[in-house]
Image: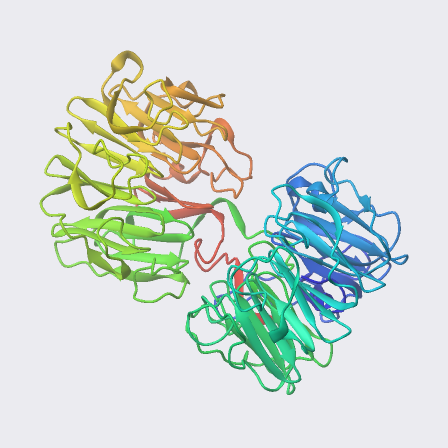
Amino acid sequence: MRSGVRQVLQCAAALALATGCGRIGYDATATVDGGDAPDAPAACALRAVSLGRDHGCAVDAAGGVWCWGDNGRGKVGVTGGGWQPNPVAVPTAAPALDVVTNSGASCARFADRTIACWGADKGGVGGTPLGAVTPVALPGPVDELVGGLGFFCARLADGGVACWGDNVKGQVGIAPTAEPEDVRLVSEVTDAIDLEAGHRAVCARTARGTVWCWGDNRAGQLGLGTTSHDERPAEATILNGADELAMGGRHTCARQGGVVRCVGYNDRHQSGPGDNDLLTLGPPLATDAIAVVAQARTTCILARDGRVTCHGLNRGGERGGGTLARDATPAAIPGLTATRIAAGAHVACAEAAGGALACWGDDLTGGLGRGRLALATEPVQLGAAVTPDFDEVAVTGDAVCAAAADGDVWCWGENDYGTLGDGSFDGSPLPRRAIDAAPGAPITNLVASGGFFCGRDPTGLWCWGAGFPGDGSGGVHPTPIRGVTGTIDAVALGHDHACAVIDGVLRCWGQNPLGQLGTGEVVDAFTPTIVPGLTGVTAVSANSNHTCAITGNGLYCWGNNSNGQLGPGRATVEPAPVRIALPGDVAAVAVAAGNAHTCAIDAGGVLSCWGLGDSGQLGFDSPGTSTPTVVTAVGRVDAVWAHADSTCARRLDGLTACFGANGSGALGNGGRFGGFTPQRFGQIDAVAPIAGIGAGHDVRCAVRADGALWCAGRASRGALGPTLLGWTPAPVG
């Protein structure tokens, strides 16, 4: 992504800078049909704005540099980590002309055409504290900067190009290397007039009209006619003569006159019609264009008459049409007449003739500059929009499904793989009915993992979403799993495998590279297969690549054991069930598996956990243990839920405590602090006990015994309902 004048358009997105400009962002909460309401009619005089993956930086009219967002590794310019939802001043030694960000660092360019950087190894220049502004010595004055994933490139005043930083795909202009590179001159390019950077690729337009490209080419985005990685920069002859280039994550677009054509990755039609990647320029996306910009997987084009049309990915509203529709037919953004456009990874902005600015897209990382995080660090009730009383809830990724008291299943959030079960791929913050249960046949035992959901009714097991492990099916509607007949007592899902207790017998199916199916082998099973040696199975839990079950003879676990999550006192893969003894060898009555840890409750209500503990998910101060260890801090419990790297348990007094990772606020404790100390999931259990909990990437939802549904965490793609949105699908300005 480039710095400079095109990025200035993004100042609409930005900020309450403490420069006397006043607030430029927004006050209202995003709505389903229009996003936020503006509160500042006049634009702030910013020289430049650049957006990285989860942080941004701006240069004000006086040359001051301001950054905001995720400060991991100091890329916002202050020491220490954490999130900076409001802009903070970066202590540069001189006023800046412009600024550019990449995925882990930021750089500013000054009037003397030198640069300084801060963040992850300063973009390849290490040796000073994270967050410290560090000059970067380049072989000449700098006229332009661009950045990608972990690297930067500079266009020098003499037409040369110098790059530094991450080089796993050869993006600094030399053969790929595992370690970041110091500043390297790109010897093949000596007369560059313009640079563009994608995720891990760079193209340069030269004064001769030629285009030279280098770096990642796995989708053919370099325009070389192949998907091979050249060791050195090569001339992309099909791009020669371009007046403008735009590079997305893995696609490149060229504008020549008014014609825009693209090459490379095309999974969401960002490069043209069809689903196949393009090794040569595709058919024209426009014939009357005056500008083109690219988001990660979206292309936006400004026409001569001011229309803006976007093609490609739309799961966060990147196309600006007011919906999250996934259809391939592009349309001009309603009500928008623009003079200039700009794009970040998942946001875009346009400037109208009078200077008014409008922005749209995925605002999860603050790209639209509303001065807040799309987080709920305390549980919020999904109210009027979610009217049924619920009995169960399950979460995977950024999708939520809940089983209502009448047996129906309602789903909302992201829908990339048909995860909502409504027959579409369009996400929604509003609940959609996935299953209209027949009378007397309610859906129960609702579970989720790996982008799909399953639930049982008296006729069998129904699943939908990202392919159902092992049975060869999958789709956008709930579908019965073949081979699952009889009375289903329990169901569990791992990332790529599933298990069901049928008439007391445990059957598993799906992928099996680490023995998670328990068959004693590491061979995949495409139909439900009996786990040998287990009788009288009453409960099963799975996550990632390990599985545990409670039988008449005790607790057994098998599969991946790299972190001791199986509990036998060793860390070796176990493809067959191994009996696990809880402290005192008391019988287990409940078990819950996380990604790399496991917890179980014994007959006396004592909770024990084991496995990886680096985020506090075990409930005691330990990096990990391979044997079950009592969690004394939580007291006696009667229910436990383990998720990726966190755990929740319901105490005998009806209160629920959670512990573990909390970067998104999903523990519901009012902040983003986690750890091994048990903390209440808000105060929602003061009214009625929590009956069930589900958690995905960054969100946790709980159903109370009275049917109320509460969620906490990052409001990603509608997972927390319509009140909190992490995106704005229609332009606001």
Which quadrant, please, contains the N terminus? bottom right
Question: Is 724 on the left or on the right of 631, as rendered?
Answer: right
Q: How is the image coloured?
A: rainbow
Q: Compared to 448, does 142 lie above or below?
A: below
Residue 130 placement (x, y as % from top left): 72, 38
Q: Residue at x 24, y 51 (%)?
A: 405
Q: Residue at x 63, y 50 (%)?
A: 175
Which quadrant, please, contains the C terminus? bottom right
Name the residue furthest top: 584
Q: Compared to 550, does 347 lie above or below?
A: below
Question: Is 36 on the left or on the right of 559, as rendered?
Answer: right
Residue 52 placement (x, y as % from top left): 64, 55
**Displayed quadrant of residue 408:** bottom left
Q: How many marks?
A: 0
Comparing 52 with 661, the one in front is: 52
Q: In the rendered image, is residue 725 in sight?
A: yes
**Displayed quadrant of residue 503:** top left
Residue 313 placement (x, y as % from top left): 49, 66
Residue 445 placement (x, y as % from top left): 23, 44
Comparing 169 with 463, the one in front is: 169
Comparing 242 with 266, the one in front is: 242
**Displayed quadrant of residue 542:** top left
Question: Is 530 on the left or on the right of 137, as rendered?
Answer: left
Q: In the rendered image, is residue 708 in sight?
A: no
Q: Residue at x 44, y 78 (%)?
A: 329
